[in-house]
Amino acid sequence: MGALFGWHLLIATPLLYASDEVSIPLFTAHYELLRNDGMKLGEVKRTTTIEDNGAMTFESYSKTTGLAALFIKDKITERTTFILNGNTVQPLDYLYDRSGGKRSRNARLNFDWTAKSVTNAINNEAWQMKIAAGTQDKLSYQLQLMLDLQAGVTTFEYPVADGGTLKQYRFTLLGEETLKTPMGEIETVQLKRERAADSKRKTTIWFARSLHYLPVKIKQGKSDDEFVTLVIRKIEGIQSQR
């Protein structure tokens, strides 16, 4: 499930990389992963931190829990290290590691912005490809969406290094919705990823206005009867902007 099922401790530090109120805060967010029938499949913890060199890291860690853990013992870590170029997220390194189950996989992307290329290393096989300005990885694009929503951007399209190719991730703004969550009611804006007509996967993300547009719900699946949902349970480190 990539960035969905692959979603860490509070550091009480001011907002980072602020630019006219547009910023990426330090936070720890805890989520539950639910099947369409409400069964809990796992837990996800996401964290932003600062590296010694001044870059930021956004890490997502997930594991199966409850009954699901009896059959699937997957643990997934996703991590992107990045800097900001103005209000654009510029990824430097991306890691995806899946272990504990039958489908182990390791992938790493290293971005060279001088050469405008990215080196892909998947299960110890490496190759390079050219990238365009503004290219994101499969985790950093969600941070870029947060920044763009804060800035009032209304067009959401990003080149993303995904699976050894450069794909265009496009999102459409569906509107506003008040979500009922374990944290209470949250005012959100809802974006849907536009995919090819023959694609069976659907992705919708709800972003919280009062939490710097942090994703608080993600729904992904093949149909209205077959999907999983990630829902926020607890947040630390972000002060509500209400």
Image (cartoon, rainbow, N blue to C red):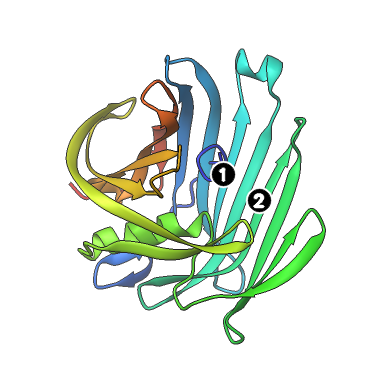
Residue 219: percent from the left, percent from the top? 39, 34
**Which picture quadrant has residue 153?**
bottom left
Determine whether, in the image, residue 197 is placed left or right of residue 180.
right
- The residue shown at (44%, 53%) is 12
Residue 171: horizontal and vertical position, in percent? Answer: 32, 53
Kindly tell me whether residue 30 is visible in this rendering: yes
Circle 2 is placed at which residue position? 96
Residue kind at label 2, given as amino acid type: Tyr
Q: Are marks 1 and 2 in contact (CB under 8 Å)?
A: yes
Q: Amino acid at mark 1?
A: Gly
**Relative image position of residue 140 (x, y in whole percent):** 48, 59
Say whether disc 1 or disc 2 marks the residue closer to the N-terminus: 1
* Residue that extends furthest to the bottom in the rendered view of this protein: 114
Badge 1 density bin: few <14, some 14–19, many ≥20, Cα 10 Å? few
Name of the residue lying farthest toward the right: 124
Compared with residue 227, is residue 201 higher up or lower down, i.e. above or below? below
- What distance separates the C-alpha of mark 1 from that of mark 2? 8 Å
Which residue is depicted at the point 59% across and 87% down? Answer: 114
Q: Is residue 209 left or right of residue 123?
A: left
At x 35% / y 39%, what residue is drawn? 216
Residue 206 place in picture, x, y as percent: 30, 41
Disc 1 target residue: 2
